[in-house]
Image (cartoon, grey):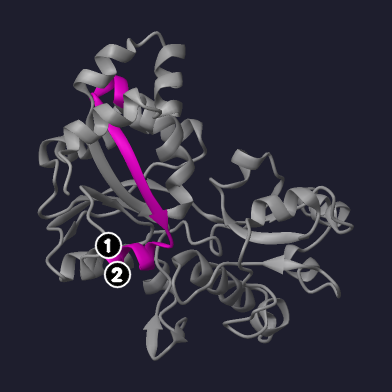
Amino acid sequence: MKRDRKDFNRRELLMGGGSLVAGAIAAGFPTRLLAEELAVLDVASAGSIRPIMEGPIKASIAQSLKLDLHSHAQGADAVAQSIVDGSLRADVFIPITPGPMLTVMRAGKAKIAQPIARTEMVIVYSPKSRFAPQFEAVAKGKANWWEILQEPGLRFARSNPAGDPGGRNIIFAIMLAAKKYNQPNLVEKVLGPTLNPAQILTGGNNQARLQSGELDASASYRIGPGWANLPYVVLPKDINLSGQNVHAEHPDVSLLIDGKTYYPEPLVYYAAILQNAANPNGAAAFAEWLRGDEAQGLFRRYQFDPPGDASTLHA
């Protein structure tokens, strides 16, 4: 039997929606008021933005907008496809890179998408790794990051490029490095096959593997390492995909996966109100809030960059 969203929200808060209530109590926000006034907002997003969504942003909009954010996050391609085929219903979609958003918009599921933040590719490494001193030397200008990644025995992880933009983005970054440093076989030497099972790990969390020392290094966006207090190597701006015109500047760089050709895209997060949103008013308020000072301040605090000159996407 379908439950009313307001009834579901009240029941969840009163019968164990623990983290939100605990956070509200700590902030001095009356839980009775929360239970009576918060409306559910379902947000589907890229997995990389999940920590800030389920933490600081969830707490902030509970107080500022009287909204209870429910997060649905994984690889942005997979989320986009679930929205298109109808298996996932949400009010707002927030992917990284234009590609997944355009998939949703071309299917008639959203009309306009606003850029809200930006990030860049980095190489995260384990402080327990035997290669940690070499990664530390990179920061001092005494070693090349791309040479360390070719060290025999180095255990490197990345996500699946067939379903996650992050998995493709590290491949593009290495492709750009190959051009920059005149290393034509760099992708093969560092990453191996596109779908390399030795690097595309399942059944666990790569940050936890880095913390334990099971992994030496992994690909990440710059927003990721801080949540786990892990060190990372900054990549040059002409490699880290932070630029807006990366495809135009490198028209020869592309990646073929399962018969589909991908091109490098800027690492911009977009937000769109989805058609047939169950809470259209809440979605509109949230979309506007994301571009305001409170949200942008949170993004800066947690290592996101401003969207800069990124353009609005239109269906």
* Disc 1: which residue: 101
- Classify residue 221 by image quadrant: bottom right
Which sits earlier in the primary sequence, circle 1 or circle 2? 2
Q: In the rendered view, tell whether residue 289 sits above or below residue 167.
A: above
Q: Nearer the viewer, residue 277 or 290?
A: 277
Within 10 Å of disc 2 (Cα), the crowding (few <14, some 14-19, many 20+) is some
Q: In the rendered view, tell whether residue 203 sits above or below residue 69.
A: below
* Disc 2: which residue: 81
Any part of residue 241 in sight: yes
Q: Residue at x 20, y 21 (%)?
A: 37
Report the magenta residues as a range: 62-82
- In the image, farthest residue toward the front: 1
Q: Secondary structure at mark 1?
A: helix
Q: Hey, what amino acid is under mark 2?
A: Gln
Q: Position of residue 211 (x, y in %)?
A: 75, 48
Any part of residue 123 in sight: no
Q: Mark 1 vs mark 2: give the one in front.
A: 2
Residue 69 magenta-highlighted = yes
Q: Position of residue 234 (x, y in %)?
A: 64, 52
